[in-house]
Amino acid sequence: MQRIKDPRTFILGLVLLAMPGLATADDRQNIYRDLNLFSEVLQRIESDYVDEVEMRELIVGGIRGMLKTLDPHTQFLDTKQYRDLMVGTKGSFGGLGIVISIRDGILTVVSPIEGTPAHRMGIQGGDQILYIEDESTKGFSSEDAVSRLRGPEGTQVAIKIRREGVDKLLPYTVTREIIKLKSVPFKFVQDGIGYVKVTQFSKRTSHELIEAIDSLEAVGVQGLVLDLRGNPGGLLDQAVEVSDIFLDRGQMVTYTKGRKKNTNNEFVDRRDSQYKNYPLVVLVNEGSASASEIVSGAVQDWDRGLVVGKTTFGKGSVQSVLPLSQDTGLKLTTAKYYTPSGRSIHRDESSIIKKGEDGEAEDAAGETREIFHTKIQNREVYGGGGIAPDIEIAQRRVNELEEIAERNSLFFKYAVEFSAYHDGITLDWRPDDQVMEDFRKMFDAENSDYTAEQWADARKYLESGIRREIFRKQFGDQAAYMAGIELDDQLQATFHLFQELKLNENLQAVTEAYKAKHAVAKADGDDSKEAEGIAEGRQFD
């Protein structure tokens, strides 16, 4: 066992030498007094505890405990973690395909990645992973979780998830795959409106996005939907370059601010927008984070387009990796990101409750939000963490039967069986009664405890899921994605928004007209497909 003759003297000397900025003798005395208590406890454990203990483990444990009082993204990196981070990734890895974070001390899924095992099995943004291989994740850092979730391709990992609105834990057994990340996997035109899905911000995202928009422009588009839902972020320079595509030269994209001057930086558009005449909608949700929030915040603050969907995740902090002794490191939050109007993107308690100079407002949850104003049209926008949309559109929740089918990969399993015995499927194919009866037999093998009414309520979703996975098997991911968007509440409502309102340059007028119209529709009890689909997110028949 590694022993330190006088751990108290060792720790106090180390800390005081590392803190030359203590201004006065009183400062030094206060820090010495507080550290003396810590080292006294350490010495007592070392001398009197019932079992011999490893002093390094105690010290590292103390460091980790100290960092937990800061924020979930600040972390002590042991030798292996530090070396792994410095080496970096090779662009692919065996895993589930989820982006995770620590939220309120709980390991939480920010979003599944399109086309990965987690996405196919229906793991959702907001899911809380409570167990990995029957080990509680309480106290885990994100890196702890990643080390357990990643593994060789073809191996399995068992997790248990808590989901809002579901009474019991949901067990998943996921087969790891090599995760190859795509930035712009899907694009198409619907009724003259272009659509581009951006799943992450990697080194070629801006180039891929320009290529996608150019291909849509060749077909002819009168507007554009930039879908950043479930996009967890990525490279800062790509967030700036993607914003450059839509903003004009000299317009600020974002800035960072911290305690030290070298953490204060401004990122400004360096070129004119080649697409500035397109009416633009940026679609976001609770899984849109980091770089996604930088882009949507910049578009909103410069009145370049409307932000539609749900308030984003609120991951707006900058982490710097600082080397320490013994080949270890410290990943430390050193600054925060702000939008051009001065809104902090990061969500924490102080940003929710503090009052801005321009006033305050309450969001739907009753939380106090700072009021800011956009740079061109002086529209009200809200701070307090995350990007609040100009127009809020909800997404329909998956019900119990639908969740069972997704979690047990029944759509995928059925598609494999069906495709083995059926040829000649075309893109206008839809499941008939015989297909649904066959699928129901497979479903009953997993869970037969449901009513006829529950099955009827879920049928349209189940039909869509079958069609989606058979198309994936027959035609690929693009066809599968197109099959699934017909039941995408937020996206269909966004397309309807283009049809319903002329998205001109007066975004304030568009927003007010939208809200006024649908407030009237709700007050009149209009439950038509169109009115309900826009006001609350398109519902199923």
Image (tube, helix red, strand yellow):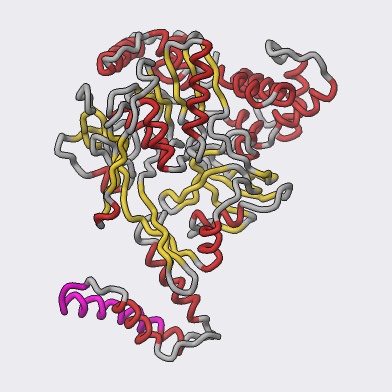
Rendered view: 220 above or below 317: above
Residue in the foreground of this view, choosing between 123 and 433: 123
Q: Over which residues does the magenta segment extend?
A: 22-42
Give the x, y percent position of residue 63: 41, 70
| Residue shown at 25% from the left, 76% from the top | 31
Query: Farthest right residue?
Result: 421
Rendered view: 475 above or below 229: above
Give the x, y percent position of residue 6: 40, 89
Q: Is residue 518 visible?
A: yes
| Residue shown at 24% from the left, 55% from the top | 261
Residue in the foreground of this view, choosing between 107 and 398: 107
Give the x, y percent position of residue 425: 76, 15
- Please tell me whether the stretch drawn in magenta is mainly helix, strand or loop: helix
Rendered view: 278 above or below 27: above
Residue in the foreground of this view, choosing between 147 and 37: 147
Q: Is residue 527 visible?
A: no
Rendered view: 460 above or below 200: above
Left or right placement of residue 79 versus residue 339 in this view: right
Left or right placement of residue 365 versus residue 177 in this view: left
Q: Quadrant of the C terminus?
A: top right
Give the x, y percent position of residue 440: 73, 24
User: Residue 170 is drawn in which quadrant?
Assistant: top right
Q: Is residue 531 magenta?
A: no
User: Residue 497 is drawn in which quadrant?
Assistant: top left
Q: Is residue 36 magenta?
A: yes
User: Residue 367 is drawn in which quadrant?
Assistant: top left
| Residue shown at 27% from the left, 37% from the top | 383
Q: Quadrant of the N terminus?
A: bottom right
